[in-house]
Amino acid sequence: MSKRVLITGANTGIGKATATALAHQGMQIILACKNPERAQAARDEIVRETGNRAVDIAIVDLSSLQSVRTFAEDIHSRYDHLDVLINNAGISLIDRTLSVDGNEMIFAVNHLGPFLLTNLLLDLLLAAEAARIVNVASSVHKNARFDITDLQHERTWSGRNAYGCSKFMNVLFTYELARKLKDSKVTANCLCPGLVRSDFFRAYKKLPFMLKVVMKFVGRTPEEGARTSIYLASSDEVEGVSGRYFQNGKPVESSAGTYDPDLSANLWEQSARLVDPSGELALVDRSALA
């Protein structure tokens, strides 16, 4: 039976390239996208290119906690398990903007939404024979000025640092998730795709000159940037491997701060309170693995 893969932000860039490659492998793909029209266009293109018609669409706005909950309910109503979850979607912004829930937007889309989504879909991953969670981070996390007491950058704002901190959180989240799931059949890894020539910087009306030069001459194609995501989602070489950070298809060291278990536990606890102030939501814990 073919594997079932859910990919966020799958209508463009690295996400679309990942979906296309995995569809070529005969996997069932779920394109989790914000825009229905773009999602449909991406699906049509992937089906034409691969001949694989097992490509579904599900709509979610990761900046909205209610949208994530509704999306998870929809996925539960349509599928009995997931083999792979790829948290690929992300944004970068210049100005500090708030989500519908009042959370800083980069933090909401790049960390908080995927945090809630992963927790809500965990039972479907546990229902698979062996499942994988793949989080798309970035090497820019190594330059982030991360402050656990100011997750939403209320005291100081820099769009560049906010993005870097969100990627730092992706790594922290992956490592904490791997620790919590170590006795299960679900693995969790993260990766850096490298600098990719895509529309990721569409919020920037004027890109810095040097960034334009680097992207033109050094930047990877989306297909090249997707290679490590594809590898982690499908390769037998990483079966059972968990809690690692990958770059260019190889496990490498992330920044020293990401290995602090107290820091990752603190981030988890703060994130849990933000997505579920009542404490009623069943988040990942040891009891879920019994």
Image (cartoon, helix red, strand yellow):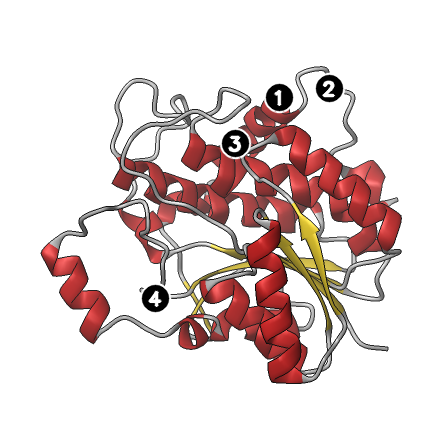
Q: Position of residue 49 (x, y in %)?
A: 60, 83
User: Can you tell which mark lies on residue 267?
Assistant: 3
Residue 284 tag number: none
The mark lying in front, picked from 3 and 4, is 4
Element at badge 1? helix
Q: Point out the tag, 1 or 4, that comes first from the N-terminus.
A: 4
**Foreground: 116 or 38?**
38
Of the residues shown, which amino acid type is indicated by label 4?
Val
Which amino acid is tagged 1? Arg
Separation of residues labelled 3 and 4 (CA atoms)? 28 Å
Q: Quadrant of residue 231?
A: bottom right
Q: Nearer the viewer, mark 1 or mark 4?
A: 4
Query: How far apart are labels 1 and 4 at the CA level?
Result: 34 Å
- Badge 3 element: helix
Q: Which residue matches tag 4?
A: 196
Which residue corresponds to the image point at 76% horizontal and 64% vertical from the top-left? Answer: 83
Cβ atoms at labels 1 and 2 below 8 Å apart: yes
Labels 4 and 2: the sequence-earlier one:
4
Apparent side of residue 135 relative to residue 257 in the rendered image (left or right): right
Which marked residue is nearer to the observer: mark 4 or mark 2?
Answer: 4
Give the distance between the C-alpha atoms of the residues marked 4 and 2, in whole angstroms: 39 Å
- Circle 1 packing at 10 Å, graded few (<14), some (14-19), many (20+), is few
Along the viewing direction, whichever of 186 and 261 lies nearer the viewer: 186
As measured in the structure, the alpha-carbon distance from the residue carrying label 3 to the one carrying label 1 is 10 Å
Q: Which residue is mark 1?
A: 273
Instruction: Report the front residue among 28 and 287.
Output: 28
Label 4 neighbour load within 10 Å: few <14, some 14-19, many 20+: many
Q: Position of residue 67 (x, y in %)?
A: 66, 34
Q: Which residue is mark 2?
A: 279
The amino acid type of the residue labelled 3 equals Leu
Of mark 1 and mark 2, the one earlier in the sequence is: 1
Q: Residue 78 at what x, y percent from top left?
A: 86, 53
